[in-house]
Image (tube, grey):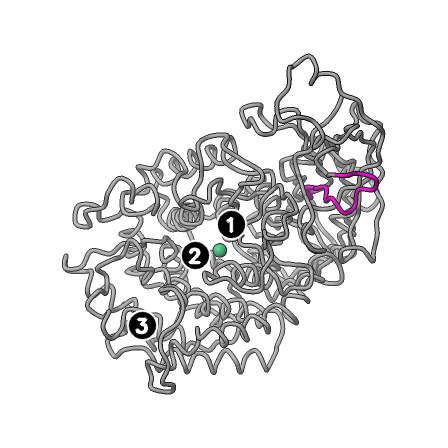
Amino acid sequence: MLAAGQALPGDWRSQGVLHLERSPHAKLRSVPVRAVRITEGFWHKRRQVNVERSIPTLLELLEENGIVDNFRRLSGRKQVPRRGPLYTDSDLYKWMEAVAFVLQSEDRPELRAQFDQLTDEILAAQEPSGYLNTYYVEERKALRFQEQQRGHELYCLGHLLQAAIAYWRATGNRRLLDGGIRFVEYLIEIGGHGKQPLLTGHPELELALVELYRTTGDRRHLELAGYLLRGDGERLKLTPRDYVYLFSGKPFVERTKLEGHAVRAMYACSGATDYYMETGDEAYWRTLERLWRDLVSSKMYITGGVGSRAQGEAIGEPYELPNALAYTESCAAIGNMFWNARLLAATGEARFADVMERALYNGVNSGMSLDGTLYCYRNPLELTGNPEDKIRNPWYTTTCCPPNLQRVLASLPGYFYGISSEGLYVHLYDNNVLDWKLQDGMALRLTQKTSYPWEGTVEILVEPAAAHAFTLFLRIPGWARSAEVRVNGQAAAGKPQPGTYFAIRREWRSGDRVRLSFDMTPRLVASNPLVRENTRRVAVERGPLVYAMEGLDQKGLESLFDAALALPSKGFASEHRPEFLGGVTVLRHAGVAAEPPLASLPLYQPLDQAAVRRTRKVDLVLIPYYTFHNRGPTPMQVWIPYEP
Ligand SMILES: [Zn+2]
């Protein structure tokens, strides 16, 4: 047993987003965030905006909306009423986790001081028992753990632990972590003797507890995660509807499909994958594999978004993937990315990296505006352009998505690489410098130079401290129609297969160069016809990016929805515009527009008359999906009709 204050095993500087050094069923170990410096390029720009605009402005809003005061009032530092929904503590914790990840990359004294200040405010509100929550206090104290389906007490603790672990890994400071451990001890005490059944009404504590176990080595932390994943259905008296919506409360391994609240499902799957990496329990793996296939075969949007319905923020039936009504909460795409990053760590299989990249570049990336001050809660695949539809906002009453997006961007360097007993895996491509070591201790620097995702060439400079034999596993994205790998100017032996890691085993010497080339020809993508809404429509992808059409880029069209792509295609013209939308490659394609405009037709008419349609030629412009709605309200669509 490890009490608060007892020494933690391991060096905080060497721990990644997930610390898998001693995880027996993880194929890959993580690389610490601090070991990867993302340099000038695609993600650098987004990360700068995150640190300089997004993170500071969100703290102002958290203060303005009383989220920090909710702690101050409990310690008597302020006499104010509690504000916001019952889960607001988690929003502050998530913001703090984002700050902690920033501090893993660079020293920012102001952010560090803010984190320490907030730690004071939070710990001053913690009860001597270890219990910490700003909602279940005073007249609601009697309700603690009595309404766990909606209560979010354990959810908030999960985010507290994640922030605290990230800060410990950033600075070696464990004050907040000790506070979190005190709360966990309290849970173990009240839950441990058959007294108080516990339920993560919103899964999240599961993954946080496994990470806590990786940090403390205290097996009880893993066991508590296991208990939560098994559920305590007998004593909790949950309804069948609860089991679906909450994605917790009954044994995870009895799940046969993804359903219920999308973020809950994605977090539960993430936590279960973490648990599997520590225990190797095959029943978990079978369930995870089954759920993953359910996701990618019929329940995931092309953007990596998850969650089809506003009602219950839920995953729908198979192939229920509406575009305008898509719920696709930013947090669900983030959960999808988290889950696939974990599956990738467990297996080293590229299919998981493909989903991770898809979600990251599209459904996650769209969630934060280009200037970093507005956020999507929903990330639909079609908008009518109605100005009432405020899709990007600075603040939400439930403000889960903004700090979630911030922590992804801040921790992103930690997702680029993995280490196995054989060598180094390269998962993501962008300009960066890796300074780390192989599993056998050999120091290694690796430098990527690229204009990815705009161009498909990646130059990699390999610099081991001394000549050394190991395998470089290079991800060949599943979307690449063809790829080429050269080492020191020579074609590498073997054919690189999209959707796999291309392994190059050799004695690497400092100065060796690898050159990857992926075919970046824009691709027309059809969906399974069972997605009825996408009948006779295509989506356009280029590299890892999904594209979309916005009304204000189309010249001479009365409505975006009058337009169709003209197929068969003579192809797209790609044009990189450094000053447009933060620097993007736009695509142009021949199209046709209905003549007269569709709005002039009757709502219903005989088929033989409707079939006679005239069109005129137009030039259509597409932009990367993640940039949608950055220039005010305008119609948008990802799935575009086509005319043969
Ligand atoms: Zn959210």
Q: Is mark 1 within 8 Å of ligand 1?
A: yes
Discs 3, 1 touching: Cβ within 8 Å: no
Tell me the quadrant of the picture where the N terminus can be found.
Answer: bottom left
The amino acid type of the residue labelled 3 equals Leu
Name the outermost residue toward the top: 608
- Residue under numbered circle 2: 22
Image: 536 above or below 61: above
Residue at x-position 49% and y-position 71%: 96
- Residue under numbered circle 3: 132
Residue 451 at x, y percent in the picture: 78, 52
- Residue under numbered circle 1: 329
Residue 58 at x, y percent in the picture: 56, 70
Residue 79 at x, y percent in the picture: 36, 85
Q: Secondary structure at mark 3?
A: loop
The amino acid type of the residue labelled 2 equals Arg
Q: Earlier in the sequence, mark 1 or mark 2?
A: 2
Q: Report the magenta residues as a range.
A: 544-558
Discs 3, 2 touching: Cβ within 8 Å: no
Q: Is residue 16 magenta?
A: no
Residue 262 at x, y percent in the picture: 44, 45
56 to the left or right of 168:
right
Q: Residues within 10 Å of mark 1 (few under 14, many from 20)?
A: many
Q: Is residue 365 visible?
A: no
Q: Earlier in the sequence, mark 3 or mark 1?
A: 3
Q: Secondary structure at mark 1?
A: loop
Foreground pick, 602 / 587: 602
Find residue 592 and report its image quarter.
top right
587 to the left or right of 466:
right
